Image: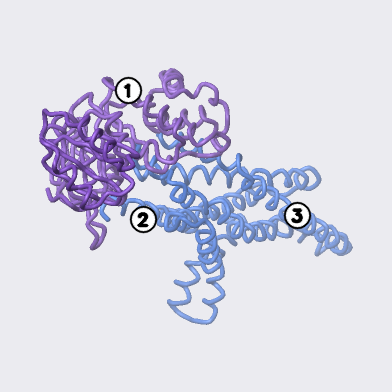
Chain colours: A purple, B blue
């Protein structure tokens, strides 16, 4: 549904996106994951025909974004990073205007507005001025306007940024509820968003593709090891050596007051590790699993991994 | 066409849901009313004196003595008022990020420019239409000629339409409304006063410069002379402003 091939975008000397290639299949939710300034917004702006690419090509729903922008714009719904709201309009007035410029036929406009108000949970604020509604509702209005012309593809740029935890959960539920009907590409710099909402992920950093694929595929290819991270009172060479001595442990590394203990997949040494920490009174504060993708993402972001 | 209409409706709603429209209409009407009142008072005093003498009595002309200077004054007020109407048109969209909605909707740049332009034209028509109410008094108690009155309003409208096109262009250049308004005002004043400069030169230079001046083409229209040359001047100037605004917005596609 979305295909990007060797896409490059330069702003003068600055290369924002470099040779990016990925693909999102119909009906899936994919995350575009990367730290700030990785090129997520630029990529989305190219896909939605807001910006032209310097090189490469991209197609959305089978239409080329540069040669057939009108067809692309009709089949795509877009929530920009800054939600494009007219503060002096009411929620339903605004959705009516968007329906008009998205060329929803006049006869279907009312039904379309009713449908998105319903699915974005905006019933209580429909008549209120956008200026006066909360940040969370504004974000919902943004998602509602993206869906008004019933597009096949939704592109959401940081849909949960700046929201409180409860609102974040609501928006995530809202997006998950759209699964199956539409192809969705959402950008984020928060990993849990991807693991909770998405089927697959495209990880980019400094405009380059670092990894892409479904979550299962990525997990399988990168997690050769299993392991835990222990947070201790002190984690130095001495403690590391202690755990290194445990049978089955492959690798131990220390960072700050955390020890990272890895063993090969298929075994489970968690009980042994915990018992050792308790027996030696190491001041165990926290113990958590090494998450494959999280690990991969951290490595990518800190520059520790080359493609 | 539907797209343009959607934008026009939205812009007019935006004008009236902010204080801009009310402040502009209020100030314009206040000034127009003041000018009209002063001119009529002056006209009455003159008429009294001139009526003493049968030769002068024939020269009394309400069109020349009231409407012509009134239109002249209104055109100067328009120079200050139009930048206030046009400054927000494109600059505000850019500042609020709402331009991203417009450009990712199936709207052409031409439709965006025209939608904004027509909305401001509607505001201009409202503004001028309300001052036309003043003329009701002149028609009720005097007998002005209709033709010069109509060409005067046509002249005001065409000139205002040109001002709007220029204002739209400056609004497309920046996301700062104040900058857009100041640059528009500067340009309008410059072109309005261009015929002062022309008196310094001579020959071809003089006629070119005075041809470019807004006021040069406006004066004759308030006297009831409708020349295609003047209409062509305003229309081509408006078209040029719209073309520049269109080019600025379109340049996003190849930058």
Q: Secondary structure at mark 1?
A: loop
Contact check, label 3 and label 2, Cβ < 8 Å: no
Where B8 falls versus A198 (above or below)? below
Disc 3 vs disc 1: Cβ atoms closer than 8 Å? no
Position of residue B148 measured from the top left corner of the image (x, y, whole percent): 63, 52
Q: Which residue is mark 3?
A: B36
> Quadrant of the rendered structure where residue A292 is?
top left
- Label 1: chain? A
Task: From the image, state whether disc 1 or disc 2 is nearer to you.
Answer: 1
Of A89 and B107, nearer the camera is A89
Residue at 35 percent across and 42 percent down: it is B103
Relative image position of residue B97 (x, y in whole percent): 43, 46
| Coordinates of residue B174 in the picture (x, y in percent) | 44, 58
Pointer 1 residue: A178
Give the mark toward the camera: 3 or 2. Answer: 2
Q: From the top left corner, tell me how far across and down residue B253 is, in percent.
A: 28, 50
Label 2 chain ID: B
Do circles 3 and 2 both sit on a common chain? yes
Give SS at disc 3: helix
Mark 3 belongs to chain = B
Q: Residues within 10 Å of mark 3 (few under 14, many from 20)?
A: many
- Mark 2 highlights which residue? B248
Say whether residue A93 is left or right of residue A276. Answer: right
- Residue at figure coordinates x 72%, y 43% from the top left: B133
- Residue A135 appears in view: yes
Residue appearing at x 76%, y 47% in the figure: B138
Residue at image coords 27%, 36%: A279
Secondary structure at numbered mark 2: helix
Badge 2: how crowded within 10 Å, few (<14), some, or many (20+)? some
Q: Quadrant of residue A118?
A: top left
């Amino acid at each position: 549904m979305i295909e990007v091939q060797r896409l490059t975008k330069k702003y003068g000397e600055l290369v924002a996106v470099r040779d990016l290639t990925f693909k999102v299949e119909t009906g899936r939710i994919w995350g575009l994951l990367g730290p700030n300034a990785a090129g997520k917004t630029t990529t989305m702006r190219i896909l939605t025909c807001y910006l032209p690419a310097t090189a490469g090509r991209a197609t959305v729903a089978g239409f080329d974004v540069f040669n057939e922008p009108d067809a692309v714009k009709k089949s795509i719904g877009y929530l920009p990073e800054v939600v494009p709201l007219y503060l002096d309009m009411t929620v339903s007035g605004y959705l009516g205007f968007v329906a008009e410029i998205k060329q929803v036929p006049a006869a279907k406009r009312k039904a379309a507005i009713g449908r998105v108000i319903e699915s974005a949970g905006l019933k209580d604020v429909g008549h209120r001025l956008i200026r006066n509604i909360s940040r969370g509702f504004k974000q919902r209005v943004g998602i509602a306007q993206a869906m008004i012309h019933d597009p096949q593809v939704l592109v959401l740029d940081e849909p949960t940024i700046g929201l409180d935890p409860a609102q974040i959960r609501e928006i995530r539920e809202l997006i998950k509820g759209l699964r199956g009907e539409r192809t969705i590409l959402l950008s984020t710099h928060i990993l849990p968003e991807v693991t909770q909402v998405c089927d697959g992920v495209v990880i980019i950093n400094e405009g380059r593709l670092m990894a892409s694929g479904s979550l299962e595929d990525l997990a399988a290819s990168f997690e050769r090891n299993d392991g835990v991270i222990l947070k201790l009172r002190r984690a130095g060479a001495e403690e590391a050596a202690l755990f290194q001595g445990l049978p089955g442990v492959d690798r131990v590394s220390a960072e700050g007051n955390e020890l990272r203990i890895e063993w090969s997949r298929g075994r489970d040494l968690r009980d042994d590790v915990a018992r050792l920490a308790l027996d030696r009174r190491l001041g165990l504060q926290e113990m958590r699993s090494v998450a494959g993708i999280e690990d991969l993402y951290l490595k990518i972001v800190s520059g520790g991994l080359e493609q | 066409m539907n797209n343009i209409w959607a934008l026009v409706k939205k812009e007019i709603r935006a004008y009236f849901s902010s204080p801009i429209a009310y402040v502009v209409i209020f100030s314009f009407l206040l000034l127009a009313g003041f000018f009209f009142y002063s001119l009529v008072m002056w006209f009455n005093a003159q008429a009294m004196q001139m009526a003493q003498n049968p030769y002068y009595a024939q020269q009394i002309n309400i069109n020349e003595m009231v409407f012509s200077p009134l239109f002249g004054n209104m055109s100067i007020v328009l120079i200050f008022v139009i930048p206030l109407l046009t400054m927000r048109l494109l600059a505000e969209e850019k500042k609020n990020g709402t331009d991203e909605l417009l450009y990712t909707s199936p709207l052409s740049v031409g439709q965006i420019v025209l939608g904004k332009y027509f909305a401001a034209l509607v505001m201009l028509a409202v503004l001028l239409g309300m001052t036309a109410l003043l003329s009701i008094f002149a028609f009720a108690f005097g007998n002005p000629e209709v033709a010069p009155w109509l060409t005067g309003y046509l002249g005001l409208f065409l000139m205002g339409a040109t001002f709007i096109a220029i204002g739209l262009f400056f609004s497309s250049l920046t996301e700062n409304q104040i900058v857009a308004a100041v640059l528009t005002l500067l340009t309008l004043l410059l072109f309005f006063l261009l015929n002062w400069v022309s008196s310094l030169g001579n020959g071809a230079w003089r006629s070119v410069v005075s041809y470019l001046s807004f006021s040069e083409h406006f004066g004759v229209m308030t006297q009831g002379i409708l020349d295609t040359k003047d209409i062509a001047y305003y229309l081509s100037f408006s078209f040029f402003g719209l073309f520049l605004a269109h080019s600025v917005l379109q340049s996003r596609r190849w930058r």
